Image: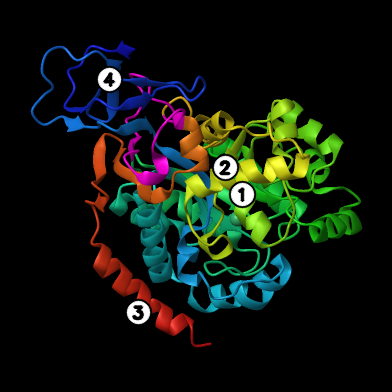
Amino acid sequence: MSESSSPPQITFVNGFILSDPNDPVAVPHGATGVSGNRLVAVNVPLDGKPPIDAIDCTGCLIMPGLVNAHTHAAMSLLRGLADDLPLDLWLHNHIFPAEAQHANPEFVRVGTELSALEMVLGGITTFADGYFHMEEAARASIRVGVRTVVAQGILDVPTPDAAADQWPARVERFLDRCPQHELVTPALFCHSPYLCGPETIRKARAIARTRGIPLFSHVAETRWELDEMTAKYRRLPVEHLAHLGVLGEGFVVVHAVHVSERERELLATTGTPVVHCPEANMKLASGACPVSDLLDKGVVVGIGTDGPASNNNLDLFEEMRSASFMAKLITEDPVALPATTLVRMATIDGARALGLDQEIGSLVPGKLADLIVVDFAKPHLTPVYDHCSHLVFSARASDVRDVMVNGRIVVRDRRCLTIDRQELMANARSLSSRIGVR
Ligand SMILES: [Zn+2]
């Protein structure tokens, strides 16, 4: 238990508290206080009666908000447009053509709001987003009240917001116009080493380093990519990036499905974080990231849903369960990726991958108040022997009752307080009627 000096303005009482995902032991019957946007007390004994406006969490677990370390939020408007296809056909025959025609600022605004709403209702308080028109994505996330790392998409080919070779000007415009807001961290997103040439990746990394912001890239996602990279550069994808000198903290490798022993060592020795997206990898039959081995080597691994068009939901509880099952299946070891590891990956390790672990990812006085209340008074969560076990193997996004982001209650009793859900869904339906007709 711990506290700092400011008196709390909002207090959560009773319930269990998962205060440290590095040592995930749920501890009962205390009070957790928030003042402004910071935690001021975590699991302190109640001194007398609780404040009249305290939020009673009896039967619930208070824990750090979940960190979705990789998604493409606006793609909620393309969900279900094309499924059951390999990645290259899915991208080139369906997603890229639809984006070229429809992914304008309005699309990004509505799609990102829709995903941000889905995510916050499911306990995700921070998400890392990679797409286009990212000023719009930042504003959409601010409206919903979710913390976001907004990464402007970069490709050598034309994109919905830049002609071929015009990405540097687009990035400058994004960095100039991205709202300076406490919920927003700007970032860059090179789609992949097969759609971004060596100079593009080097230059993007130089800009990111100068600005002190993260750079994301899909890397080693499919066997097709390995063939492409070895034919073009005579190197495997991670070897290629090491050769370019871009690996290291702040370069976030998404997927790392097909990585050789040498590449795993490169990720570890350079301190390059990885984001694991098991459900998208399964749906697109890409393969399985060797998460257990990467963790053994000391790589920081967060967890992501990937875009809602390749998953097809943004439920990080489901993603934790899938990650654990996938690891057990591929290693034929039931001990692989236990629940406590998954809870860490979905909170503090995801935050570390994004460079935000000093501020979020755990419930410690002084840190930003991003927390969720999970309602365990449900048939599928009763009885409770081990809260972490239930979080990973039994809980669902819909079990999240309350959500606080940056000291503000965004969801209370399963209802989002920031945005008109019916109006937003009506806007999404209206846009979809244009997208479906191609
Ligand atoms: Zn992705």
Q: Which residue carries the number 4 mark?
A: 29
Whether residues under marks 1 and 2 lie with C-beta atoms below 8 angstroms apart, the answer is: yes
Mark 1 CB near ligand 1 (8 Å cut): yes
| Circle 1 crowding by C-alpha within 10 Å: few under 14, some 14–19, many from 20 | many
> Amino acid type of disc 1?
Cys
Distance, label 1 to label 2, CA atoms, is 6 Å
Residue 395 horizontal side relative to residue 331, left or right: left
Nearest the viewer among 311 and 217 is 311
Mark 3 or 1 closer to N-term?
1
Mark 3 CB near ligand 1 (8 Å cut): no
The magenta segment: 360-387
Q: Residue at x 32, y 73 (%)?
A: 427
Residue 83 sits above or below residue 394 on the image: below
Q: Which residue carries the number 3 mark?
A: 430
- Whether residue 356 is visible, yes or no, is no
Mark in front: 4 vs 3: 4
Q: Main secondary structure of the magenta part?
A: loop
Distance, label 3 to label 1, CA atoms, is 30 Å
Residue 13 sits above or below residue 374 on the image: above
Distance, label 4 to label 2, CA atoms, is 30 Å
Q: Which mark is residue 381?
A: none
Q: Which residue carries the number 1 mark?
A: 277
> Amino acid type of disc 2?
Ile
Mark 4 or 2 closer to N-term?
4
Q: Which residue carries the number 2 mark?
A: 303
